[in-house]
Image: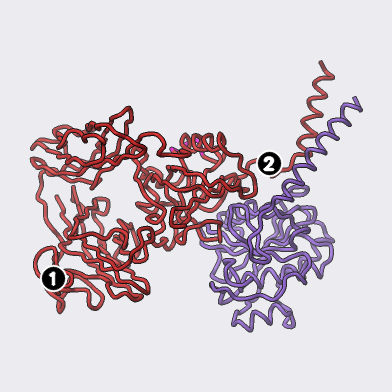
Chain colours: A red, B purple
Amino acid sequence: MMQHLRRSRLLLAVLLLVVPTSLFAQCGVERWSVKTGTDADVGLVNLNSSTNTTIAALRAPAAPNPIPPNNRVSPWETTEWVLNATLTLYKLESDSDYHLVLQDAGGLTMIVEIPSPTCVGAGSPFLAGITNARNEFNARFTATTSFQTANIPVQIKGVGMFDFLHGQTGVAPNGIELHPVLDVIFNPGTSPAFALSASPTTVSVAQGGTKTTTVSTTVSGGFNSAISLSASGLPSGVTAAFSPTSIAAPGSGSSTLTFTASSTAAAGTSTVTINASGGGVSHSTTVSLTVGSGGTTTQILGNPGFENGSTSPAPWTVTSGVINNSTSEPPHAGSWDAWMDGYGTTHTDTVLQQVTIPAAATAATLTFFLHIDTAETSTTTAFDTMTVQVRNSSGTVLSTLATFSNLNHNTGYSQKSFNLLSFKGQTIQIFFKGVEDSTLQTSFVVDDVNLNVTQ
Amino acid sequence: MKKFALGILLLCGTVTCVLAAQQQASVDRPAEPNLAFDDDGGKAQIVPVDFSLAGPKTFHGGPVLASAQQVSIFLGAGWGDTQVRGREASLLDVTASAGNAQVTELKQHSIKTLRAAPKLEDFTDLSQSKVNDLTIQQKLSDLLKSKAIPAPTAGTVFVIFLAPRIQSTLGGLQGGIDYAAYHNFVNLEAGEIHYVVVPFHENADTHSAAATRAFAETALNPNGQGWF
């Protein structure tokens, strides 16, 4: 027995001496808390729903400057994205991450990474997903310290993360990655499936009022079934009605979801879960529903439709040539609009207005109408972009609400909506910035910008 | 018993050799000369052991530092040895020599070299251990958080001199074999940190020359995309 123990100890000692230390896990440093979900903002990440996207769309936004070391940039780093692409290369990095290079049909690439679960804090809400993704990957491939070629279609689910540009293999120009990856499906689309989304995902309704959002489904892999819809998590005094109540087979379509708040509905913000099921497949997504306390709602932006004309755009501050009444880009309503870019040369236009959201606000919703037309023909590359940001009075970016591009071109106008209640009590700038590259025009036309505040 | 132990050693030795050979054979390198992949997939610039392989540098775009100031960190218990410690003086300000070719090159590109800041000695016992680039980044993070080293300015370059018997690695490369020094950068709460890592070299002149080259390349090529 003693001899056996000695042999075991000797074996352990010898192994410790000779096994290269590189075989033991070591974890990363740079933005590691954000990469693994132990940062201060991880609570902002909505893991109850996911949003379909593309490599082109993720590469579109400009990288934040500066990139916060331990905080998140919304919505890119607070959203669980779903991406279909081809996995081309993979490698085990010294920080124990699996470095995966994804490529779309147009050749655009980006990186997604699966950390080692041993490098993820126990309190991370991502731990279960990371472990799941790591196991899924290990079941298919063996990553080593050299790049290996895969060339296999994948569906990746993960949370966005802006990495610093270091010349990484396959990196997107803005450094965005899905990091961590929470789920990997190899060869997706071979089994029937559908995707579910809602727009807008933020809805404010006053007591005694109604508001709507549109629920949409798209099918893949030969899915052919009706999809039934339901809502749960409604606050007291609020009802939800779908029209139609189900999406007819084969399962692609939309339904208008109407929230009706009674005069005694509970005030506050709730997360409403929309459930969809059909053909043996179920999905859910969420909508943030704010019930106003029945107070007065006031639109607090000045000159919201730019109807003061080009000679006196105040309180907007705009770059030259933006305020427009030409028939080339007609307004949503009235006579004037804000027409950013459209030159077909390298150009940047901005439109901003400073405003204070009262501290007593119970709801604050920014809406505007947006029309985009373009001469760009790409269906994959965002050459020209318009970002919508909230900045403080010094111009520091507090939040990037959305980034639109030539890929989002539309006929007519569509209304956009964002919840700004988190900025109550602050003086902020509503900031639009259109950036156009050296050729082929894209026009971003904004009109009827409202900031409705209830208090 | 001896036969058993010998057998185990032989077996493990074989396993180690195979693993080492696999590792050595499978080290990915970027296409650019004298660049290497670091420990989280980015690129870092190395000073080859044979300086003649460094070759002339070509500008490929990207920023340069307007000025560069050395902050020396002597890392490892080995620097506590009196004889070794005596070498620190010659490494404290690697651009102090006006006739230095690297300094001349920096001047040609209008990069100012500032007088070196005070050194830090960290006698943590790292002897017989491997220190990779992640270890260096974590050490810098810890030193900055504890204010053991000053918060960096735009021109600060932390130059980390490793004590004897510390094995430096960068991605799959090994200090002393694949490189004489390297430089890299990392973004921490204190901002973007530029740093140089110099493994110990028995020859004092080679040691200093490797540090000087890596320091100059940091100023010319802080993010690895400007000059190589």
Measuring from the top left, give residue B16's x and y in whole percent.
Answer: 78, 41
Q: Is residue A122 magenta?
A: yes
Image quadrant assignment for residue B149: bottom right
Q: Can you identify the residue that label 1 sits on? A: A336
Q: Along the line of sight, which residue is nearer the eye, A380 or B96?
A: A380
Q: Is label 2 in a helix, a strand or a loop?
A: helix
For residue A336, side relative to residue B39 (left or right)? left
Asked whether residue B119 appears in the rendered view, the answer is: no
Instruction: Please give the range of residues in magenta.
Output: A121-125
Residue type beneath disc 1: Trp
Q: Chain of mark 1?
A: A
Q: Position of residue A101 (x, y in %)?
A: 52, 51
Residue B219 x, y percent position in the rendering:
61, 72
Q: Dots 1 and 2: beta carbons under 8 Å?
A: no
Residue at point 65%, 63% (across, down):
B35
Q: Which residue is mark 2?
A: A23
Q: CA distance from mark 1 to mark 2?
A: 65 Å
User: Which of the two discs, 1 and 2, labels the residue nearer the N terminus?
Assistant: 2
